[in-house]
Image (spheres, coloured by chain):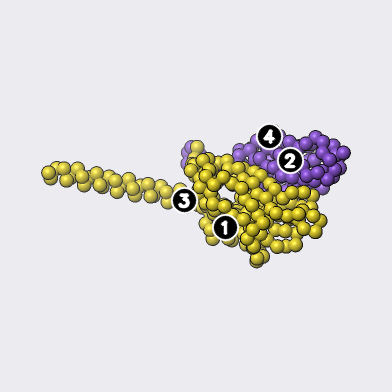
Amino acid sequence: MARALINVPPRAKRGQVIEIKTLISHVMETGFRPSSIGVLLPRDIITEFVCTYDGQEIFRADLYPAISANPFITFHTVATQSGTLTFTWTGDNGFSVTEQAAITVE
Amino acid sequence: MKAKLTIDQSRRALIKGAGALVCGVLLTVRKSEATPASMQAAIRTVFGNAEIGKGKVTLDIPSLVENGNTVPMTVSVESPMTATNYVKSIHVFNEKNPQPNVIGIHLGLRAGKASVATRIRLADSQKVVAIAQMSDGSVWSGQVDVIVTLAACVEGL
């Protein structure tokens, strides 16, 4: 299973804009590179990344082969209430990884 | 004297041959690439016939990139991010990668700040364009020219 790293501040003030950093290990094979025998390697990328905050979608990105290997995405959200952030990466060949992080809002 | 001339001629023939070979290789390598026209087509697919204004969008990429395989990119949009005025989506396009699309970002009311960072691949020195759509439907763009010394995508294993 692919390893994912998520950085969410554990505590935040209500209404504060927080920064969320995510990194997942994935080759992101573009489908444009030839292999050692000269045949193009088939595309194998993550196509979609979604972040939900207590079930409500706050961020979504469509990824293309132009995203580097081990996609690193940083984005922002407003800390509204204590809850769970869910991160889902889906891609080619049935790739799907879901991670969670908790945040306490005071 | 005559012998020297023949050596000179064969040297020239060799250089010409090598030159032709290099050109041939370059042509075959460059076959599949996005062009400014295909980038425009990709932009029109996403935004339709919307009028694209200049400004409000800042694309932060180092202007000289050593390794095209991992290019840090930050895209931010000037917006108060209130309930009535926020950024709906940001799309990034390029001119010379095999595909014109780079990333499509969908934000919403709860983003708080329209600033996203990631790492991208660039196949050549080229222009990168970021286009944002606001909640009122207006579309804004920002662009940057990047020089890439080691290209991504082209090399094999």
The letter of the yellow chain is B
How far apart are the two marked residues, 4 and 2, measured between alpha carbons?
Answer: 19 Å
Residue designated by label 3: B30
Residue depicted at x 25% and y 47%: B12
For label 3, the SS is: loop
Q: Is residue B98 left or right of residue A99?
A: left
Q: Amino acid at mark 4?
A: Ala
According to the picture, the residue beneath numbered tag 1 turns out to be B39
The residue that mark 4 highlights is A2
Q: CA distance from mark 3 to mark 4?
A: 33 Å
Q: Residue B100, position in %: x, y?
A: 58, 54
Quarter holding the N terminus of chain A is top right
* Circles 3 and 4: CB atoms closer than 8 Å: no
* Viewer-side label of 4, 2: 2
Q: Position of residue A100 (x, y in %)?
A: 78, 37
A79 on left or right of B7: right
Chain A's colour?
A: purple
> Could you confirm whether marks 2 and 1 are on the same chain?
no
The alpha-carbon separation of the residues under discs 2 and 3 comes to: 38 Å
Q: Nearer the viewer, mark 4 or mark 1?
A: 1
Image height check: is A76 above or below B143? above
- Can you give x and y, in whole percent of width and height, for residue B119 in the image? 62, 42
Q: Is residue A94 visible?
A: no
Circle 1 marks a residue in which chain? B
Callout 3 amino acid: Arg
